[in-house]
Amino acid sequence: MADLNNYLSGGGKSVKLRDQRDRVRAASDDELQELLRDVQPEMLQLRAQAALQQAANPSRIGQIRKLVARVHTEISARASKAA
């Protein structure tokens, strides 16, 4: 299971955008797929909490969405480089 706190700020630690980008680029294809698979349940939970106005940290939704976009971008860049 991928640890989202390695990619996002959490637990009192802040992850800089540059570090996040470097970690996504350094991850293997399997790690990126695992990260996408692991982020889905948390995203679903955060959306439900936001709908009920119970989200402790509503900005985390945006952070996760941006991380997912970065991962998808890296996957497509690797695919086009390989082709």
Image (tube, rainbow, N blue to C red):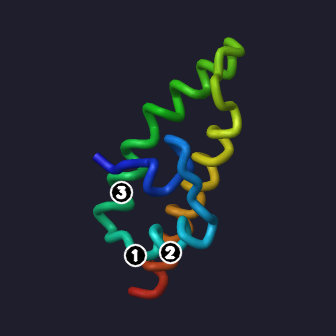
Task: Work out whether residue 33 or residue 10 is closer to the camera in this orientation and state it.
Answer: 10
Q: Which residue is mark 3?
A: 33
Residue 83 visible to an observer of this rendering: no
| Amino acid marked by disc 1 | Ala
Say few, some or many: other residues with alpha carbon within 10 Å of mark 2 (under 14 / 14 to 19 / 20 or more). Answer: few
Task: Work out whether residue 81 or residue 20 is closer to the camera in this orientation and state it.
Answer: 20
Residue 60: x %, y % from top left: 63, 39
Task: Work out whether residue 49 or residue 5 is closer to the camera in this orientation and state it.
Answer: 5
Q: Which element is circle 1 on?
A: helix
Q: Quadrant of residue 12?
A: top right
Q: Of the numbered discs in the image, which one, if any, rests on residue 26?
A: 1
> What residue is rendered at 49% in x and 56% in y?
7
> What residue is rendered at 65% in x and 31% in y?
57
> What residue is rendered at 59% in x and 19% in y?
48
Of badges 1 and 3, nearer the viewer stands 1
Question: What's the distance in space between the residues labelled 1 and 2, CA to CA?
Answer: 6 Å
For the C terminus, which image quadrant?
Answer: bottom left
Residue 55 visible to an observer of this rendering: yes
